[in-house]
Amino acid sequence: TVLIIDFGSQVTQLIARRVREAGVYSEIVPFNQAEAAMARLNPKAIVLSGGPASVTTDGSPRAPQAVFESGLPILSICYGQQTTAVQLGGVVEGGHAAEFGRAEVDIKEASALFDGVWEVGKRYPVWMSHGDRVTRLPDGFTVKATSENAPFAVATDEKRRIYTTMFHPEVVHTPDGARLLSNFVHKIAGLKNDWTMAHFRTAEVAKIRAQVGKARVISGLSGGVDSAVASVLIHEAIGDQLTCIFVDHGLLRKDEAEEVVRLFRGHYNIPLVHVDARERFLAALAGKSDPEAKRKTIGALFIDVFDEEARKLGGDAAPAQFLAQGTLYPDVIESVSFTGGPSVTIKSHHNVGGLPERMNLKLVEPLRELFKDEVRALGRELGLPEHFVGRHPFPGPGLAIRIPGEITEEKLAILRQADAIYLDEIRKAGLYDQIWQAFAVLLPVRTVGVMGDARTYDFVCALRAVTSTDGMTADYYDFPHSFLGPTATRIINEVRGINRVVYDITSKPPGTIEWE
Ligand code: XMP
């Protein structure tokens, strides 16, 4: 085990992710529980994370002194570097030019951390985020790399195996960071590359059992990967103590509802309540054209329907004590911006917020530490079919936010057909897995066309496809015209109600991925 001691950085989870990628088990604990965790986990290496505090402030967090007395290899990042310096007798000062974002480091001397990655005398890009800096190193430390504003960009005590960096090796903006972390866990700490998703599955099943005990759990399926993976994992842990509720709001894509039902009832034999609420949702959405009004309507009605169904399950007794959610790590951090300040609501993503409070349920969130691609790997591990696991993300409000303006049954039907053709062409071209999300949007705009000898006056369909790693930023996918042309023709020929197709080439920012 690698113990990651968290000082509150926005990116601590990324350290855990990189260590997992290196095939080594890790656990994150808050700094004030670190001492107990050391006794419990008997770690073989320790990482100190970054954090928002300044070590020059009274009462700022420190690592337990036992960390430094343990003789274990230590990697201290950013705030971790500063507290390491102070705790071992060095000096840290505030008030220097802060360095945020991209910087370059010059490698001065060899270090075990750089082995096979960075060479002495060369310069490499890294990602910095800090205000304070170390001004005097503790005894035994030497400077291994510098940057313009950080004379101690990397300082280490190779004998005691304490490595400190002022930059963040865990973020993708430090291109070689994953290899530095791999050096730390493999070459320095001597840990084996033997931890896999299969281990995660076993460990998480045990955690779920311990959390839930004999209580009942309900889970809302959305048709997407996250809720499906969470539900299958929880079912593996507690069997029929879990009931899944699938609210079909009629805003799903073609054949999606049937597929979910088949997968859960047929493939896994997991208890599933399938609620056909299509008419209720359409009725509630009637007359609503503002994107946020649509989201709120869908979110609120979803909670009503879910609550009603869950109560039916329980008879007079409480239906369940726990609600399962497929919350991923990016959902956990998305509410707080990267720089630590509160972020502005661009879109209210949290579709079912309020449900646990209203139903008085505690949460089971077995995917809370994972990123999307890790959830996919876990889904494969659990035997979910590849085409299901590999699916693009799909928003909770579904097609309702892909039809700007008012939603009607007719528009939904048109969009479903166009979207299915588009995705079919993408799959046939072998491009599906290169794209983060691809979908059709039905614009509430009619244009004139000519088909055969007749005039048409039909809707415009916009096609969207983006690449992204987390949905936070995105670039449009650069299809060849030889793909776009025939796909547009097929949509216009096969879908009644569409006579024009356009391709959206907006990146995010300034656009968003969805149109609403
Ligand atoms: P945007 O459109 O904000 O989307 O660039 C980023 C990611 O979030 C998804 N999205 C939503 N997901 N409820 C959801 O569950 C929503 O209301 C919602 N709006 C956008 C979007 O599909 C993309 O993956």
Image (cartoon, grey):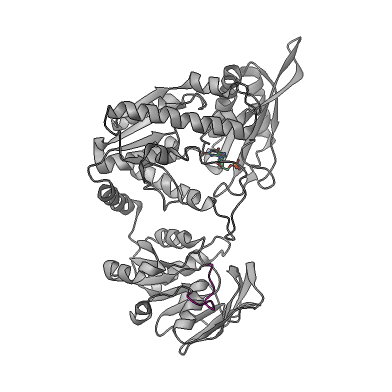
Determine the residue located farthest toward the bottom in the rendered image: 139
| Above or below for 193 versus 107 | above
Image vertical order of residue 13 relative to residue 464, above or below: below
- Give the side of residue 104 with respect to residue 168, left or right: right
Say above or below: 229 vs 10: above
Q: Quadrant of residue 108?
A: bottom right
x then y, percent, for residue 214: 22, 42
Q: Residue at x 59, y 76 (%)?
A: 132
Q: Verify whether residue 281 appears in magenta.
A: no
Q: Does residue 58 show up magenta in the picture? A: yes
**Residue 453 picture location, percent across and down:** 76, 9
Res 13 seen here: yes
Image-quarter location of ligand 1: top right
Q: Quadrant of the C terminus?
A: top right
- Name which residue lies at 61% across and 20% down: 411
Residue 34: % across, % down:
36, 69
Numbered range of the magenta stretch: 52-59
Q: How many marks?
A: 0
* Front one among 82 and 52: 52
Q: Residue furthest top?
A: 453
Q: Main secondary structure of the magenta part?
A: loop
Q: Give the side of residue 442 with respect to residue 206, left or right.
A: right
In the image, what residue occupies the spot 31% across and 54% down? Answer: 199
Is residue 383 in sight in this rendering?
A: no
Residue 280, percent from left and from top: 49, 20
Closest to the observer: 130 or 103? Answer: 130
Q: Residue at the location (34% across, 55% down)?
A: 196
| Residue 497: quadrant of the picture | top right
Q: Quadrant of the N terminus?
A: bottom left
